[in-house]
Amino acid sequence: MYILIKDFANMMGEMVPARLAEEWDNVGLQVGRNEKEVKVILCALDFSQEVLEQASQVHADIIVTHHPAIFRGIKQLTDRDWHTALLLEAARKDIAVYSAHTNLDSVAGGVNDVLASLLELENVEGLFGEDMLEGIGRIGVVKETLELDAFAEKVKKVLRLEHVTVVPAGRPVRKVAVCGGSGMDFLDCAAQAGADTYVTGDVKYHDAQEARGKHINLIDATHQGTELPVVNELADRLALRLSREGYTAKVLVAKETKLLQIV
């Protein structure tokens, strides 16, 4: 039995509720026909040319992404812009696109829980002091106190990164806050929650100054690096849920090139 796009969207809405998305976000079904059957699903971080090409190669009926395929308002749907050209191509090939963004950041088992798990944090709870099951960001403690260099090496290893950027504040690593993607807006929350170290991405120069001024170590493990691990987790959860409900569908994970590379 195959699931229809509309029913798949409802299932995703149960697994990753839209109520957890930030007000400015755009989540849910972004491209596609509601009555189409889903036989092959491709999970990815981004809606990109390489992902769309893979979707075509594996005959995917829907691409499930973390970053929204449509984020800001679109006034013209033409091939003059690379992004809208991709949307047109997906529609032409009858490949639907579903996106779960900040709701996947916040949901239990989402981006930040996966990140905290990979870093082997214990006693994990929400960064804002709310129930650990929901909310952007997580905070927990490492099994044993580490020097920052040693912890940075661990971050590199578990996230399979060639490098990370470190801003030392002269403190050993014991209590760690994490926020996958671009999380510098929550630096104050990490500091107030008692974190001595914050792992996130997209750190700018003045962000680094702010962290050092607040005496909190900072590790920029890149936007992509901190979020990619959730894709495999989401694919596994989807496959299990579909199987449990009696649906026949193949769930695959896209191979995505690292956007930022060392040369």
Image (spheres, grey):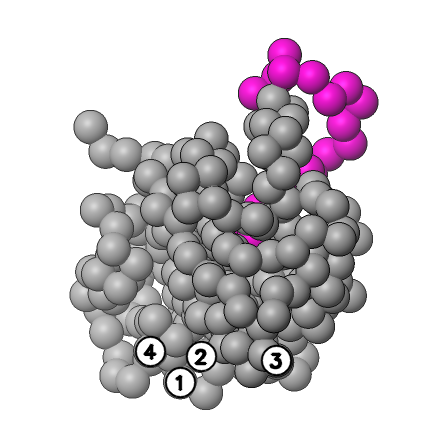
Q: Residues within 10 Å of mark 1 (few under 14, many from 20)?
A: some
Q: Which secondary structure lies at badge 3?
A: loop
Q: Are marks 4 and 2 in contact (CB under 8 Å)?
A: no
Q: In front: 216, or 241?
A: 241
Tag 2: residue type? Gly
The secondary structure making up most of the magenta span is loop
**Upstream in the sequence, badge 3 or badge 4?**
4
- Name which of mark 1 and mark 2 comes first in the sequence: 1
Secondary structure beneath dot 1 equals strand
Category of crowding for the residue at label 2, using alpha-carbon neighbours closer than 10 angstroms: few (below 14), some (14–19), many (at least 20):
many
Q: Measure how far apart labels 1 and 2 are at the Cα level.
A: 5 Å
Any mark on residue 245, and which?
Answer: 3
The residue type indicated by label 1 comes to Glu
**CB-based contact (under 8 Å), mark 1 and mark 4:** yes
* Residues rendered magenta in the picture: 64-83
The 10 Å Cα crowd at callout 4, few under 14, some 14 to 19, many 20 or more, is some
For the residue labelled by badge 4, is the local secondary structure a helix, a strand or a loop? Answer: loop
How many residues crowd mark 3 within 10 Å: few (<14), some (14–19), many (20+)? few
Mark 4 against mark 2, which lies toward the viewer? 4
Q: Are marks 1 and 2 in contact (CB under 8 Å)?
A: yes
- Mark 3 or mark 2, earlier in chain: 2
Report the residue at 23% width, 33% height from top. Answer: 262
Q: Is residue 212 above or below residue 106?
A: above
Q: Is residue 194 above or below residue 62?
A: below
Q: Nearer the viewer, residue 258 or 241?
A: 241
For this orientation, the residue located farthest to the bottom is 123
Q: Are marks 3 and 4 in contact (CB under 8 Å)?
A: no
What's the residue at 46%, 62% (across, down)?
250
The numbered mark, 4 or 2, whose residue comes first in the sequence reads 4
Give the labeled residue for mark 2: 140
Q: Residue at x 57, y 49 (%)?
A: 61
For residue 122, the mark is 1
